[in-house]
Image (cartoon, rainbow, N blue to C red):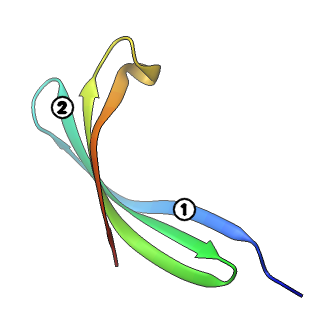
């Protein structure tokens, strides 16, 4: 039987406030697809924006496989 299950989860969050409007978030994202598990480190920059969903917007995202 073919395993086409897929799971994605995040962990190990670090938050760094740059100034009142910008924040950097570093975290691990893990994926298990068809029994194969892979992880990556993600670094995201967020900016306050009152018009955006939940009041913040993504400015930049960088991902590197572990």
Q: Residue furthest top?
A: 51
Residue 28 in the image: x percent, y percent? 38, 65
Q: Which element type, helix, strand or loop, lies under badge 1?
A: strand
Q: CA distance from mark 2 to mark 1?
A: 25 Å
Q: Are marks 2 and 1 in contact (CB under 8 Å)?
A: no
Q: Quadrant of the C terminus?
A: bottom left
Classify mark 2: residues with Cα within 10 Å, few (<14), some (14-19) or many (20+): some
| Quadrant of res 57 | top left
Q: Which element type, helix, strand or loop, lies under badge 2?
A: strand
Query: Residue 54 — which label?
Result: none
Residue 16 in the image: x percent, y percent? 18, 45
Classify mark 1: residues with Cα within 10 Å, few (<14), some (14-19) or many (20+): few
State the residue at coordinates (24%, 28%): 47
Front residue of 7/1: it is 1
Q: Residue furthest right?
A: 1
Q: Is 17 left, or right, of 45 in this rendering? A: left
Residue 43 in the image: x percent, y percent? 27, 54
Q: Is 51 left, or right, of 34 in this rendering? A: left
State the residue at coordinates (34%, 12%): 50
Against 30, is 22 above or below?
above
| Quadrant of res 52 | top left
Q: Residue furthest bottom?
A: 1
Q: Earlier in the sequence, mark 2 or mark 1?
A: 1
Against 1, is 57 above or below?
above
Reading the image, the residue beneath label 1 is: 9
Reading the image, the residue beneath label 2 is: 22
State the residue at coordinates (11%, 37%): 18
| Quadrant of res 58 | top left
Residue 27 in the image: x percent, y percent? 34, 59
């Amino acid at each position: 039987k073919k395993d086409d299950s897929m799971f994605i989860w995040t962990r190990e969050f670090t938050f760094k406030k740059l100034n009142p409007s910008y924040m950097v978030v570093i975290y691990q994202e893990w994926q298990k697809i068809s029994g194969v598990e892979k992880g990556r480190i993600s670094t995201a920059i967020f900016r306050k924006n009152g018009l955006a969903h939940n009041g913040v917007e993504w400015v930049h995202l960088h991902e590197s496989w572990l």
